[in-house]
Every structure is written in C-alpha cells, then in structure tokens.
Image (cartoon, rainbow, N blue to C red):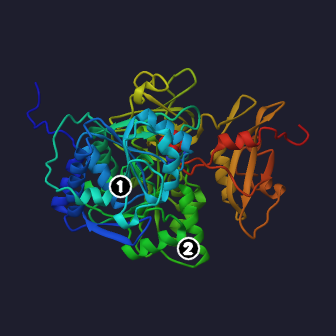
Amino acid sequence: MQGLMMNRQLMISSLLTHASQNHHDTEIVSRLPVGATHRYTYSDAHRRSRQLVRVLLALGVKAEDRIGTLAWNTHRHFEIYYAVSGMAAICHTINPRLFPEQIAYIANHADDRFIFFDVNFTKLVETLAPLCPTVKGWIALCQREEMPECAIPNLLCYEDLMAAQSDDYEWPEFDENTASSLCYTSGTTGNPKGVLYSHRSTVLHAYGSSVPDGLGLSARDCILPVVPMFHVNAWGLPYACALNGAKLVLPGPHLDGASLHSMFEEEGVTMSAGVPTIWLGLLNHLQENKLKLSTVKRLVIGGSAAPPAMIRSFDDLFGVTVLHAWGMTEMSPLGTVNTYKKKHLTLPAKDRDRIRLNQGRSIFGVEMKITDSDGNALPHDGKAFGDLLVRGPWITSGYFRSEGGEALVDGWFPTGDVATIDADGYMQITDRSKDVIKSGGEWISSIDLENIAVAHPAVAEAAVIGAVHPKWDERPLLVVIKKAGKDVTREDLIAFYEGKVAKWWIPDDVIFVDELPHTATGKLSKLQLRERLSDYRFPGA
Ligand code: ADP
C-alpha cells in the first residue's frame, strides 16, 4: 500500500522562493571584487534570479545546457546558482585557481555554453577563450562602466543583459532527480572528474546539513562562507542559508585575516566556514593585533584535518566553537560533523578534548563503514582502521560521462580515506590511503604526526610524508615551516614526539622549508611534496 502524501518534487528554486516569502528583508551582503559593498535582500535575490532566467532564455540557453562560472562568492554568483538550476540547466562552477589547461579541459569536457566570470579573471579568460570552442559567450559579472578592456570574443556585460529583461518568470516544477549543478574534483591524480548533483540531492543535503548536530543553522544566524562557491558549492551554504533564512555575507576575493575580521565585526557574523589555511591566517591576524571576535560563535573547519592546536586556540582564546567537519566533492560535501553527545558534557575536560578532535559523527543520510584490504567490514571500536566507504542520497553514484570507470563498490562509494569509527559513531581520518606511511608492513598516520608538529610553538605549518627507506620501505619525514622569528632544531622536534606516539612512529628526519605546495583548493599537496623530495635519502640509510 502506498502512502497518501503529496509527491511534491524537491526543487532548488523552492529554497529561494521560501526565503523570499518568509525572510524577505533578510540581507545578502557582498564584498565585490571591484566596487563597493553590495547589499540587498532575499526578496531582491529572488526577483533578480528570475530576471536572470529571462537573460538565459534570451541567449538561447536550454534545459541541460551547462553554464560555467569563474567567480568569487558574490550576490551575482548566488543569482546564477538559482537561475541556472531553476530553469533546469546545469550550473558548472569552475575553480579559477586551476591551471588554464585544466580549466579548458574541464570546460570542454562539460561542454559549457556560456561562462560567467569576475572581471579580475579577465586575463585568465583571454587565455581560455581560444581553447574553449563550445563557449558561445563570456559574461563579465559587472556594470557597463566596469567592463574590462580586453580581447575576449563574444564578451557580454551581466548588468546590461539584466537591465534588458523583466522578472516575469514562474519557476517550473520538474523531476527532482534532474541534474542541477556540476563540480569537478581537483584531479590530483589523472584528469578531473565531474560530480553531477541533482535538485533532490541538493535540497536533501541542505536539510541534512542544517540540523542542530550538523551545522546547526537558523534564521538568527549571519553566515559568511569563506569556502568559495567554486569549491563544492561553498559546502552547500548558499542553499542551506536560504532554507533557514540566515543572513548571508559573501566575501568576494577578500579572504585574508584582516578582511575577514572586519566583515565578521561589521556584519555581525555568527558562523563561518572554510579550510584550515584560511583560519591560520585569521588566527595570526587576531593574535598579532590583539583583536577579539565579538559575534562569531561557530567556525566550520573542513576540507582537511583541523589541527588540534587550532581548535583549542579558537575555543580558549576567542570563545568560538569549532565544528570540525569532513566530506568531499562526491558527497555534496557534508559527511560528518563533530559535536558532543549529552553523556560527554559531564566528562573531565581532557576526555572531552579527545572527542572534539576527531572528524565527528555522520549526519543522518550518510552511512559509513570501514573495510580491510579484502573488503571485509571492520569493527566500529575506535581502534581498527581501514578504507572508509559511504552511501546516501547526496553521494555520487558515478562520474559525469562515466569518467574514471565504475565509482561504486557494491553500492558504496570508496572515499580514498583511511579511518577508524568508534562505538558512538565518531569517525577519525587517519590518512588519505595514498598518504599513509607504510613502514615495515605497518601503517603510520601522517596526519597524527602533522598534528603533533603543529602543536610545537615554533612550527607554522608541517607535512609528513613517507620517504623511501632501504630497510623499512618507507619512514616518516617531517617537513616544517618555522614561525617568523622563532627557532627550533631537528633534534628539538624529534624529541617533541617522545611519549606522544609509539617510538617507531617518530619521524626519522626533519627538513625546514620556506613554503609547502598546496592544491588549487588550498590543501597541502603531498603528491607535489613527494615529487619535490623524490631524491631525498635519510642520513646514513
Ligand atoms: P579535492 O581535494 O579534490 O578538493 P575534496 O574537497 O572533495 O577534494 O576533498 C575531499 C578529501 O579531503 C577527503 O576525502 C579527505 O581526505 C579530505 N578531508 C576533508 N575534510 C577533512 C577533515 N575534516 N579531516 C581530514 N581530511 C579531510
């Protein structure tokens, strides 16, 4: 027997309609790449998004067409998100930090029809235009008087196009499984692969991420996504904020500590989200200038492991709760968030501390399991570690155009992470499967060793890789950037590990460097670091 409930389709456009009706005067504030701060409301965004659909229709855009963006977090990018998906076309956000050849590969693979771009990417677009024959027009996200002087063919002006259209448009309702947006993984190995989200997966992810033990969003929040809208849809925040009617502050390209601090204070930001590198910049700025955070209550840190020292600094020095979150492009991206359970609240501080450092519990909708190398399920005892697999309604079932072959193993998506899960459901990433250090047949977690190193007062950033060793196959090599004005020796750092990990985990050597390689999404690139250090040999080995 079937239930007798309405089968309304889960539509992305309904998020904005809801925000516009119920939070009409809640603001969306943008610090634009050029020009002043822009302010308007959900009701304005709703009107302008429908106007933008008219623009797209006038340009000949049809359902299923891929529409690219090379853009920072701004109100115009927000309008593109809703207009493109809302008319059943596909919003393809492209990471402008990639090399031009990679961007051209992605735009051609996606077969992008039009690409919207921020004017500070004009040079990049000049390089890309001849490499992207399917792109019929390049739309600069600016007013007429801000249009760049350049050699881009079929160049159009966003605000001119908007001015020529009315907002007379009704959002259509169609199958919720229709593709809505497309994001390519960074492709640290092989070509980038496209993850194709649907209306259903996007709306469910917005619900799932909002719950109190998820990101805990509400209409009383003011949220500043530092995570770019070209990085897994800014972790879904442009959707979840509309669902909750939260005020949204979009920082454009202004992501340094000083800019973030001023936006936090001026707009009354209560929650923000970004990768650890960003928060390192903010922490340094706050400490150097003896500043406080007067309104921020929660910071979501994810994308790579939040170092324990960072979690503690925000809590102890600034009264900010860090929500350590884990996920990936293929998961829309949210999988787990670290929050306490009731029984933890009465624990002594040091036991609670241990809990808040892992990647957290899965939000409802995400199932997780760990397996050994033969695919056998391992116990959730907090000790056994193995390959982490996930499934759920906002997790990919395959890549766009079947790139890279079968994505699933028996209906589960292998994350490429190695993890433990404890009896309470808390998951801890011990490594990327390709970064685990294999010493004499045993596994050493590079992340654990990095976390210890960054807790040293003289260490600004640290990476640990497995370097070849004639006897043990691989041994841990610690690569460190010292804090400005601080000194520390190889011996000090090696001694710093004593008593914190098993003796055979302690790095065999330390190298000091001025900078470490990062990927286009701001993560430490162990792949590049291993390549750079491929000639390295341990002393005496
Ligand atoms: P890309 O590196 O291609 O941008 P993602 O942004 O999808 O890809 O990265 C997903 C990966 O990032 C995860 O599989 C995991 O290895 C790592 N990651 C994300 N969040 C965390 C976290 N909180 N702790 C440790 N690793 C994380």
Label at residue 286:
2
Residue lying at 41% horizontally and 70% vertically, measured from the top left: 35
Q: Amino acid at mark 2?
A: Leu
Q: Position of residue 162 (x, y in %)?
A: 25, 57
Q: Earlier in the sequence, mark 1 or mark 2?
A: 1
User: Going by the image, does 280 lie left or right of 213?
Assistant: right
Q: Quadrant of residue 218?
A: bottom left
Q: Is the distance from the Cβ of mark 1 to the nearest ligand 1 atom less than 8 Å?
A: no
Q: Amino acid at mark 1?
A: His
Dot 1: few (<14), some (14–19), or many (≥20) neighbours within 10 Å?
many
User: Going by the image, does 513 lie left or right of 303?
Assistant: right
Residue 186 seen anywhere in this rendered image of the structure: no
Label at residue 77:
1
Question: Secondary structure under badge 1?
Answer: helix
Q: Quadrant of the N terminus?
A: top left
Q: Position of residue 391 (x, y in %)?
A: 39, 32
Farthest-out residue, bottom: 290
Residue lying at 75% horizontally and 70% vertically, measured from the top left: 485
